Image: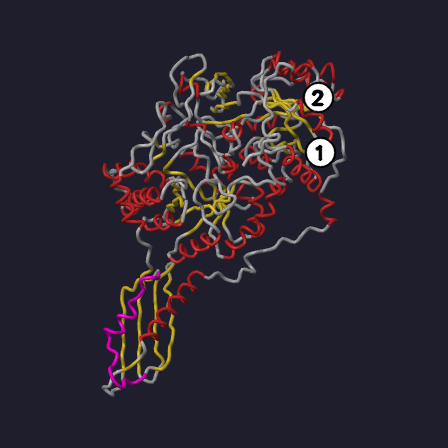
Amino acid sequence: MKKVELLAPAGGYETMVGAFNAGADAVYLGGAKFGARAYADNFDTQQVLDAISYAHLFGKKIYMTVNTLVKEREYSELYDFMLPFAEKKLDGVIVQDLGVMKLIRDEFPDIELHASTQATVTGVNGARLLKELGCVRVVPARELSLMEMKEIREKADVEVEAFIHGAMCYCYSGMCLFSSMVGTRSGNRGRCAQPCRLPYYLAGSHLKEQYPLSLKDMCTVSIIPELIEAGIDSFKIEGRMKRPEYAAGVTSIYRKYIDLYYKDPTAHHEISKEDMDILSSLYLRSQISQGYYHKHNGRDMVTLDSPSYNGTSDKVLSDVKEKYLDKELKLKCKLICRLCVGEEASLIMSLVHGGQEIVLETHGNKVQEASKRPMDKESVLKQLSKFGGTVFEPEEIDIDIDDRGSEKGIFIPVSELNELRRSLCDQMIACITEPDNMASAVKHKTAESTDELENKVQNLSDHKPCLHVLVNTTQQLESVLEVQSRNHNISRIYIDSNLILGSDGSFDSDGAELFVVLPYMTRHENFDGTLDIEKIADSAMEKGISGLLVRNLEQLGILKFRGYTGKIVLDYGMYIWNEQAASMVKDMVSEVSVPLELTIHEAAEVTDKVRKNLGIPVSFNVYGYAPMMISAGCVKKTLDKCSGNQGKVSVSQTAIVDRMGNELKVTTNCRNCYNVIWNALPTSLHKKMENIAGRFPFDNYRVDLTVEDSAASLNVINGYSDFLRNGAIGKEFDNLKFTTGHFKRGVE
């Protein structure tokens, strides 16, 4: 029976050693760059190499987090960063960025690719797509139910790694822009400032400050049998930012109950109060839950009153340190030493590693007959037992001394015995850890010929950018059509899927191309959102719809495997931070969108390469409220009550207020049961348009209407439409309160 892997966090080398001592099968760690915990201790290059060697000595694994989004100008650093780890036989890499995924797959195929939870895998189709792109394992969104994870494991035939313990994000990981938009610390770059842990209150309620976005920590030790039986391949403990005692202590408890299950799968093992007290003393928040495994959301999953941690126990910390952190693992071995006069001294070491017995022998100089004091077994044993500074621990040492009947005994210098021992240790370590010839493991991509590239790339001639407008409500659509009837310069209208699903007929676009905006989230849970995607795709042609705006991997997978032939545009949340990310999906999409976290110059860099080298048009957002969080949690349900419309075509609005008095509007999508928390102000680049239009190579400008009423919608559309018509911004924006987002203010 293949047993579940227990995967622990390692913010530093000491933490790694402690986690392995406590029973972890593998650890995940970050290097000096590209890891999603920028403020952890992390490992420098040599420490990572040492960690790989140490882990492989004991049959353990090292997974490196290379799970940040990588800017175009940074991409060239990736190969040199990864090369030494590939040569050292790194076991796996946890990745979010499709471009990073491409580099690992193409250049270092012997390293396993694991899709990070930041990739927001929410179903079978997204997982299948990632498998086709080279991933052997996915870490699904933490919001998924156990049923959904089991379905991914079975139907996508890909390994599943699931979180079992630790802190929980309120937003679907990878879809959170909150920290980025209110500052410069991006969660997609490992620098989240955790605004979800701050107080907010429901707009208009005048209640005391609460913490509606702060989820309780996850603790699933009591449902381990159920998780194992669901087929999850790897149990992941959150916490690379936490101290070594946390990783070791938590790992030890989960190791205990995993082993108890495999010892007798039919028995019920009650979690002892002592073990729960230990977990509670290791940086758990004041309240815990089992996460989303058995529920979609709920008030009882939120730490409404205070998201503070429990008090830590000095005794627990001390016990954990003594038991797991103040020692290192040892490889049990056997030694056979033969010292025969006239023959070379022989020392043999044997041990079992990876289910196989390894036997090595080393030889010294010829053993001499003793002229004075002979060397006895006790003296030889004393020297051969000195393994204190190594990873070896002899369980048995057999010594055979033969003076060939002279009865004078034998003599061998102590220094030579020590050298035999040291030499054999070095040989055994090399045997276990030295990689094969990396020439076959590291494959350098051969550049495509100019002719081949030209055949693939569609020439995008320079042209005046088109105006695209996205609408979420009927009133917004009416405003767009009013402007279109007058100016006729809106070339595409994106219509939210709820409007399409709530209508039996087609839509009049007055000459504009029609696209359907798919939901931010698609899951196969109590309500099967995948059916909506299939229905929309199948009926697109008869409704006069030219294409779809895709917002997640699940939707892209559905359309690919269904053979959808219409146009596919990737939204800004399908992150194209570098040309290679676009290259990974170039055969599946018609157009891509610039991510909201790039500055204008960073956006121009990636746009220029995507257009010239891949022939893919690029859309650039010039107006819209940024969706700072997409969450399975429901603010309305937590602070008020559920609408009861789950699964129905229903959208409602509410708002929360932060400490500074800013009102953040919240849209509740009841059909797919998720919330969108919008930025307090819209991002608008109307004052930058003359500069943008004259210098930067975007194919389309996009205006997103989200929570605006009819009057506000008219002002915005008129303003941008008039700019395209006469090159000047009018008075429509005079009273607009806005931000320019990351136009100049880049993320760290």
Q: Amino acid at mark 2?
A: Ile
Image quarter of residue 494 = top right
Say which residue label 2 marks: 490
Q: Earlier in the sequence, mark 2 or mark 1?
A: 2
Q: Which residues are magenta?
A: 368-390
Which label sits on residue 329?
none
Structural distance between the alpha carbons of marks 2 and 1: 19 Å
Asked whether 374 falls inside the magenta stretch, the response is yes
Residue pictured at 51% horizontal, 51% vertical? 111
Image quarter of residue 570 = top right
Residue pictured at 55% horizontal, 52% vertical? 108
Relative depth, front residue between 200 and 547: 200
Q: Position of residue 126 (x, y in %)?
A: 52, 37
Q: Tell me: 254 left or right of 212.
A: left
Q: Amino acid at mark 1?
A: Pro
Is residue 226 depicted above or below 648 in this figure? below
Is residue 531 depicted above or below 383 in this figure? above
Say which residue label 1 marks: 697
